[in-house]
Image (cartoon, coloured by chain):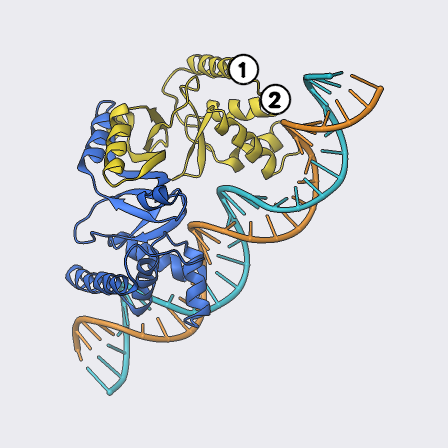
Chain colours: A blue, B yellow, C cyan, D orange
Amino acid sequence: MSKTPLACTPHDHDHCVSHALAEADSLCARQGVRLTALRKRVLELVWQSHRPLGAYDILAVLSEQDGRRAAPPTVYRALDFLLENGLVHRIASLNAFIGCNHPEHPHQGQFLICRHCHTAIELEQRAIAEAIDCAAGSVGFAVEGQTVEVVGLCSNCREAA
Amino acid sequence: MSKTPLACTPHDHDHCVSHALAEADSLCARQGVRLTALRKRVLELVWQSHRPLGAYDILAVLSEQDGRRAAPPTVYRALDFLLENGLVHRIASLNAFIGCNHPEHPHQGQFLICRHCHTAIELEQRAIAEAIDCAAGSVGFAVEGQTVEVVGLCSNCREAA
DNA sequence: GAGGGAATTGGTACATAATAACGTCTCTAC
DNA sequence: GTAGAGACGTTATTATGTACCAATTCCCTC
């Protein structure tokens, strides 16, 4: 995992991570579910990375940096919890996870993934979701979940190229 | 792999598979690429299944039914070829492959995947693609590839439920 | 504070998905 | 017919994800 240049300054980023963690805390409290130390740490790692993070990347940090004796199920359980409670999203095309920008309301985001810097931007465009619902409805299909993942070049990397 | 009830009669289905294979033949001839026996067989297997088929499912058929000594790379190479030439699509959320309905022109379909019967329906809605392009464009993101995979209940399974 | 049940985590083993690397064969153009 | 490219066989390995059971922790009740 090489470090990616961050879009915001380190200070901004730290702030935004701690904000996300605080919001997760209050959200879990309201839902009556437990954001344990392990789960919080996994959430922090996912948020600290601007690029989607693989389960085994998380596992490596827990083992090597935190000195925790962790095996795959430990990480996947934490990720399952975070997914269920809308705190992270899974990017199917990358087998990776990313922090959710709007955990306060249930939704399924759309993602723009830069093939160069690997940053993922979360969108939440009703127009996209509606176009899908409409097309599905016209063939009698009842939508339950949408996966929208777009690969390309982000504006920064376009300029650099 | 349990058999799924087919949307069309077996005869129709056989017809549609052989039609797809014939079209693939002529398409490859036009492109100057070789649709070898192995590649054609893999394409046939993918087409015969209404549900997306995993690489290892294909591998099992090649080994057990065809008696061919096949290992994973054999299957993945054939699938790579078929993907490159637009003859099959990959469903990222299922790690599986499905025959392309419109191989004659390059495109990336959208897929409706029934969680009950596991059938996948390919859409090709410009409205969806355009909604995505538009949203991406507004943040300066240059789209190169779209993954749209929708899970839910198909009309047959809704009625049955 | 003690007991008990549920939730959480630790840990092993395994299942599934995909690729690397190298050798051999086959097809085709010349 | 032969050289070169492309296709396939083969072995090994990496990457991703899950089943299962044991040990621990948390929280509620008494």
Left or right: B18, with B126 as reference point: right
User: Which chain hosts label 2?
Assistant: B
Q: Quadrant of residue A75?
A: bottom left
Give the mark nearer the N terminus: 2 vs 1: 1
Which residue position holds label 2?
A: B36
In percent of width and height, residue A26 lies at: 17, 63
Tag on residue B25? 1
Given residues B135 and B20, the one toward you in this image is B135
Q: Residues within 10 Å of mark 2 (few under 14, many from 20)?
A: few
- Above or below residue B75? Residue A8 is below
Q: Residues within 10 Å of mark 1 (few under 14, many from 20)?
A: some
In percent of width and height, residue A126 lies at: 18, 37
- Above or below residue A2? Residue A144 is above
Q: Quadrant of residue A138?
A: top left
Discs 2 and 1 share one subunit: yes
Q: Is residue B87 visible?
A: yes
Residue drawn at x 25%, y 23% as measured from the top left = A139
Tag on residue A5? none
Q: Which quarter of the image is occupied by the C terminus of chain A? A: top left
Q: Which quarter of the image is occupied by the N terminus of chain A? A: bottom left
In percent of width and height, residue B7 lies at: 36, 20
Kind of residue indicated by mark 1 = Asp
Left or right: A58, with D25 as reference point: right
Q: Is residue A144 visible?
A: no
Residue drawn at x 34%, y 38% as measured from the top left = A150
User: Which chain hosts label 1?
Assistant: B
